[in-house]
């Protein structure tokens, strides 16, 4: 293989023939010399980050309150649903118990 006709992929360090080398534009204006596979990976990655960014801006978490009811002491209370996740055991603010809470 003629060494002058090859380049080293800057991402996976694979030696690729010049005709299979792709230039991937970086945010700083320079180009990344990569193989075809890495170029595809970079494009895919870029698309995913972009869609993640747009979904982040469109889906702003709005505080949503759920009403819960403690059967133990007939006490109704409201909890931020974002905080009342699976990791958080809902606790009755009146009796402090978690075992008789019902969502309404
Ligand atoms: Zn590569
Ligand atoms: Zn209670």
Image: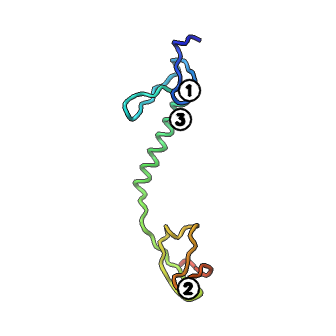
Residue at numbered disc 1: 13
Helix, strand, or loop for circle 2? loop
How packed is label 2: few (under 14 Cα within 10 Å), some, or many (20 or more)?
few
Instruction: Please give the label number shown on residue 41.
Output: 3
Ligand 2 falls in quadrant: bottom right
- Image quadrant in which the N terminus is located: top right
Question: Is residue 88 left or right of 51 when viewed as pictured?
Answer: right
Q: Nearer the viewer, mark 2 or mark 3?
A: 2
Q: Residue at x 52, y 19 (%)?
A: 7
| Residue appearing at x 46%, y 49% in the figure | 52
Asked which secondary structure carries label 3, the reply is helix
Seen at 47% across and 72% down, the residue is: 80
User: Which labelled disc corresponds to residue 33?
Assistant: none
Label 3 neighbour load within 10 Å: few <14, some 14-19, many 20+: few
From what the image shows, is residue 92 above or below residue 85? Answer: below
Q: Is residue 28 left or right of residue 48?
A: left
- Disc nearest the viewer among 3 and 1: 1
User: Which numbered marker is on residue 95?
Assistant: 2
**Looking at the picture, how far across and down is residue 67, in whole percent?**
49, 78
Q: Tell me: is circle 1 under 8 Å from ligand 1.
A: yes
Q: Secondary structure at mark 1?
A: loop
Distance of label 2 from label 3 (alpha carbons) = 55 Å
Between discs 3 and 1, the one toward the N terminus = 1
Q: Residue 63 appears in which quarter of the rendering?
A: bottom left
Q: CA distance from mark 3 to mark 1?
A: 14 Å
For residue 37, which quarter of the picture?
A: top right
Q: Is mark 2 within 8 Å of ligand 2?
A: yes
């Amino acid at each position: 293989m003629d060494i002058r006709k090859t380049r080293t992929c800057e991402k996976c360090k694979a030696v690729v023939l010049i005709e299979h080398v792709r230039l991937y534009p970086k945010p700083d204006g320079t180009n990344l010399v990569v193989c075809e596979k890495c170029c595809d990976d970079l494009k895919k990655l870029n698309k995913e980050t972009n869609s993640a960014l747009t979904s982040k801006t469109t889906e702003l978490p709005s505080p949503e309150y759920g009403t819960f009811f403690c059967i133990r002491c007939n006490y109704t209370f409201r909890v931020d649903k974002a905080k009342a996740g699976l990791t958080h055991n809902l606790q009755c603010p009146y009796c402090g118990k978690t075992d008789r809470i019902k969502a309404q």
